[in-house]
Image (cartoon, rainbow, N blue to C red):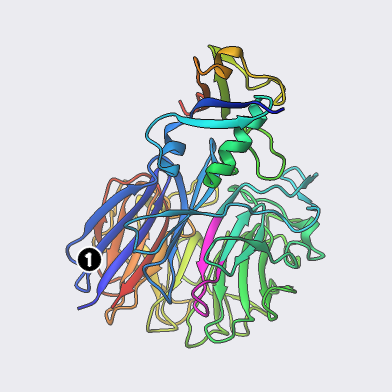
Amino acid sequence: MSGTRVLVGTRKGAFILTSDEAREEWTVDGPHFPGAEIYHLKGSPLDPDRIYVSQSSGWFGQVIHRSDDGGATWATKDNDFAYDGVPGEHQWYDGTLRPWEFTRVWHLEPSAHDADTVYAGVEDAALFKSTDGGESWSELSGLRQHDTGPQWQPGAGGMCLHTILEHPTDPQRLYVAISAAGAFRTDDGGETWLPINKGLRSGEIPDEDSEVGHCVHHLDLHPSNPDVLYMQKHWDVMRSQDAGDSWHEVSGNLPSDFGFVISVHAHEPETIYVVPIESDIHHVPPEGKLRVYRSRTGGDEWEALTEGLPQENCYVNVLRDAMAVDQHESCGVYVGTTGGQVYASHDSGDSWTAIVRDLPAVLSVEVQTLS
Amino acid sequence: MNAITTIRVVLPAPLRTMVGLDREVDVTVQGPVTQRAVLDVLEREYPALLGTIRGRTDGRRRAFIRFFACEEDLSHEDPDAALPDAVVAGREPYIVLGAMAGG
């Protein structure tokens, strides 16, 4: 029987939850790096015992850790995220220009094409790449230096590059998303980038269908159909049929189309999950009910998944990196909340259980399916 | 001739844990004993500390880091100024700590 390892980043450390394929009984290991904000930790698809961690702290700044034994021990890796050349300027909240300044790593994406390659998405928005397992980093600066860079602006959480998706078979193609600039695609390994925001409409910016400036919260795709992209934007759930060249809205009957997460089922490319949040001001579930919504039609038609989830007096949030799916035959879905719960379903979302309940606020959830 | 001086340095607990120290650390400085010289040696011997006390690019003290010695706050002193005699003589440690922040 294969195993399951859930990697949870929180405001005060990292936790590793383990179970077998049945996913009924869980062991909680942690906190690792107690007291530090762990924005993200993720394992290599090619070497699952290799796990990268982004640790951030107001006192001590950015630290990168790597484990080569599944989280039993850790080694500190390079934290020199130096922008290439002289950083330019981007929009600040008040519309003035402000120099790019590194703050933290939001997301680490170990490559599925090469075991020593890992990408880092950072604030202020830029993409870095390491080809030596995190021993050194260099910026893929064609993204930050895109002509539209001076129009990018921070969302409420900062101007962060938070989503990095590899194409499953073409190592030269990557998708990234930035709050609040939008989605971008490269077809040459990161040398040049194309904004892929046609069809997005955002009332929060002066030109609501602008080329950039959209607050994209998360992207996902299914490896069997990688030209189909799904997006949870600030408001609106969106779908692209053409690798991001155009988008159309698939919010359908959701109770709110604001939210942060979006994930695709492991084995059903048209089955997707979101967690509706009431609004960008409230940041809580509508009606105090935590509901994961599932569409089996690639969007537009949604059903509420509620069994095992709190359906009264629930006012937690689910942040953009806090949902993941495993690869077991019966697909597991995992959701972490700012209230410190990690909810898991081992039946594609039909029923849910809190596998841990009282962690610090959850920032990220990733899952590894172990053979 | 550059004198060789051993300085006692106290690090905040999270940084001690990160670099595997369970107590204060001795730092050997060649030449003038200044805050910059001590931190340069410390970062050279423990590269994991790079960026955690001073900025990687500008070398400036991180906002929530303070430097104390002999019951004095040296955080705003010239990093190239000489450290107090008691620190140079090893009677007092040079203390790096996280500022009081967080409630």
Segment tinted magenta in the rendering: A106-118
Q: Is residue A113 magenta?
A: yes
**Residue B63 drawn above or below residue A371:** above
**Residue A339 drawn above or below residue A349:** above
Number of other residues with Cα within 10 Å of mark 1, as a class: few under 14, some 14 to 19, many 20 or more: some
Q: Is residue A358 left or right of residue B45?
A: left
Regarding residue A236, the answer to whether it shows in the image is no
Task: Determine the chain carrying the residue at label 1.
Answer: A
Quarter in which the C terminus of chain A is drawn: bottom left
Quarter in which the N terminus of chain A is drawn: bottom left
**A298 or A118, which lies in front?**
A118
Q: Position of residue A133 (x, y in %)?
A: 52, 66
Residue type at mark 1 is Ser
Q: Position of residue B21 (x, y in %)?
A: 41, 37
**Residue A295 drawn above or below residue A207:** below
Q: Quadrant of residue B30?
A: top right
**Residue B64 drawn above or below residue A3:** above
Helix, strand, or loop for circle 1?
strand
Q: Is residue A8 left or right of residue B100?
A: left
Name the residue tied to disc 1. A19
